[in-house]
Image: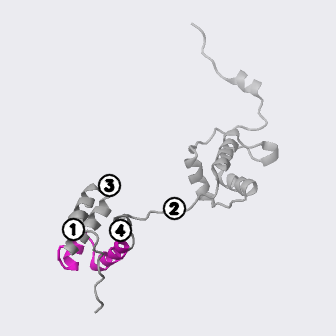
Amino acid sequence: MPAPVRLRTDFSSTELRRLARKAKDANQSRRLLSLAAVIDGKNRAEAATIGGMDRQTLRDWVHRFNAAGPDGLTDNLTGGVAPRLSAEQCAELAQIVEAGPDRQKDGIVRWRRIDLQRVIAERFGVDYCERYVGTLLKKLGFSHISARPRHPGQDAEIVAAYKKTSRAR
């Protein structure tokens, strides 16, 4: 059976409890209370139960506490994966979507996700799957609205003359 990991001695249980009261992070507070219980003489299983963890997890936190002190008991949250499009590129994409496709250049009358996927790959050199293009559009503030279809060869004057109007009273 391995020997228990020694806990650093420059903090007393009273100091750890005081730090737990002042901590803004609830997880850090739980860990500090568990370590205070260890200093008070409780066995590791009871101290782990106080913090809502098992003995191995408590042992891992003791290692972090010994290395970095009370600040080492906070969660190390990463920012996640960096976005592949910069803020300027996202703004440019929003302008492209807002302006709509050019019929002669793009060969289409409305944007679809697959068309925007192609434009993003050509302009910015970033390959997204078709489903993520919809997620990206949602993040940019666009919603799925389908325009009423209009034949490209229709005459606006004929359409205006055909519309029914109510007689004036």
Report if the CB atoms under discs 3 and 2 are less than 8 Å apart: no
Q: Amino acid at mark 3?
A: Lys
Q: Which residues are magenta?
A: 40-66
Label 1 neighbour load within 10 Å: few <14, some 14-19, many 20+: some
Report x, y in % for residue 36: 22, 69
Report x, y in % for residue 56: 31, 80
Between tags 2 and 1, which lies in front? Answer: 1
Report x, y in % for residue 161: 72, 21
Q: Which residue is mark 4?
A: 69
Identify the disc placed on residue 13.
1
Q: Can residue 63 be found in the magenta stretch? A: yes
Q: Give the mark count.
A: 4
Query: Which sits in the foreground, 7 or 83?
Result: 7
Looking at the image, is mark 2 or mark 4 earlier in the sequence? Answer: 4
Q: Please tell me in which quadrant of the rendered image residue 146 appears.
A: top right
Q: CA distance from mark 3 to mark 2?
A: 23 Å
Q: Amino acid at mark 2?
A: Gly
Q: Which residue is located at x 63 percent, y 58 percent? A: 84
Report x, y in % for residue 11: 27, 68
Between tags 1 and 3, which lies in front? Answer: 1
